[in-house]
Amino acid sequence: MNRPPGRSPRTAVEAAVEAARWAPSVHNTQPWTFAVTGEEISLRADADRRLRVADDEGREMLVSCGAALFTMRVAMRQAGYRPVVRILPDPDRPALLAVVTAGEPAEPDERTSVLVAEIERRRTHRAGFTGLPVPDRLVQALVRSAAAEGARLTPVRAPEAVAVLAALTQAAQGVQARNRRFSLEVIRWARPPGSSRTDGVPAGGYPLQAARTEPHFAQRDYAWRHRWGSTGADPGATDPGVVAVLTTGGDTREDWLAAGQALQRVLLHACAYGVSAAFHTQVLEMRHLREFVREELCSGEYPQMIMRLGVTFDAKDAVRRPLDDLLD
């Protein structure tokens, strides 16, 4: 196949790296760097941005990097080239997570174009939803999106199971809030009003006081001992939305990267239909609670993300580090 008119592999590489910086990450830590060599991109984990208290094994860091990897793949495809990906290519370099190369020219399909259009529009939600329904047909499409990346997205339909997840989230948040090391780590990534930082969660990115959902899913206390947060959230947005758990059959570094790719594919797909996601990782940061969820609610699969999907009209700005800070 001939090269797409006006598109070079180098252009596709640049588009992929630019898009990747918009991927979601825990506390918006953006724990990645990129190295570009010709038509090849190396994705590396930035261990200095790992949550040392909450994420001592680096699982959340790699899930975040997996989201960046999927974003690179879909952006490169939109730029007219098939991405060729090697996962964990060098055992002697554990920080090197993937190498992405611009392969054969390939015209993007409609689905790719739809996903790419949402990369910069997608936002994480940190409160309740409006109560407008998420169509079952869309939920099933999101399940298929996760499966396409080697993960399983399971909507939690039973009210009793939803109540259990809500209670576990409250318990984990309560324990973490009493732990000074956990609290200081969260506040490290919370940004005060007017901050010029380009990482972490800005004060406009979470409500000053979130309305309680029923059942209640506890939120992170980014404003710990401060009066930070947005006052523009809809106080009537109390619906929890569709609760879902993203799981993988294994719990290796490869599985964490696969979970991140599945997560981003699901988020972009949902965003195209006006659906946002709220995340609850507190439970998964406590080994015994995560194991309980795995055994009792996930049929033995490993939970990588607990989320709520719903409709919100609470628009937020996003902050991302400039590309110069990400290129190694």
Image: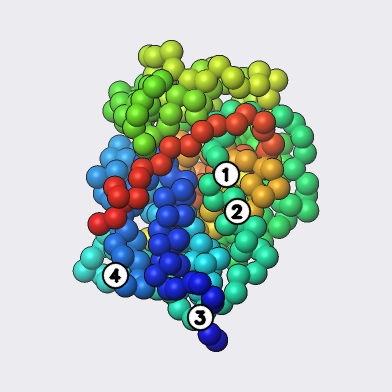
Q: With 121 as the anchor, is 11 left or right in this view?
A: left
The residue lying toward the viewer, choosing from 151 and 314, is: 314
Per the image, the residue denoted by label 3 is 3
Residue 116 appears at what percent x and percent y? Answer: 57, 57
Question: Dot 1, how many residues are within 10 Å of its Cα: few (below 14), some (14-19), or many (20+)?
Answer: some
**Hey, what amino acid is under mark 1?**
Arg
Contact flag, marks 3 and 2 (Cβ < 8 Å): no
Secondary structure type for disc 2: helix
In the figure, 213 relative to 77: above or below? Answer: above
Nearer to us in this view, 325 or 303: 325
State the mark number for residue 143.
none
Crowd band around label 4 with a 10 angstrom C-alpha radius: few (<14), some (14–19), many (20+): few
Position of 174 relative to 54 (above/below) = above
Task: Farthest residue to the bottom: give it.
Answer: 1
User: The disc labelled 3 sits on which kind of residue?
Assistant: Arg
User: Is 86 situated left or right of 302 in this image?
Assistant: left
What residue lies at 62% left-to-right and 61% top-to-bottom? 113
Identify the residue position indicated by label 2 in the image: 117
CA gap, disc 3 to disc 4? 20 Å
Q: Which residue is mark 1?
A: 121
Nearer the observer, disc 3 or disc 1? 3
Callout 3 secondary element = loop
Query: In the rendering, at what x and y percent does residue 73 appear?
Result: 49, 65
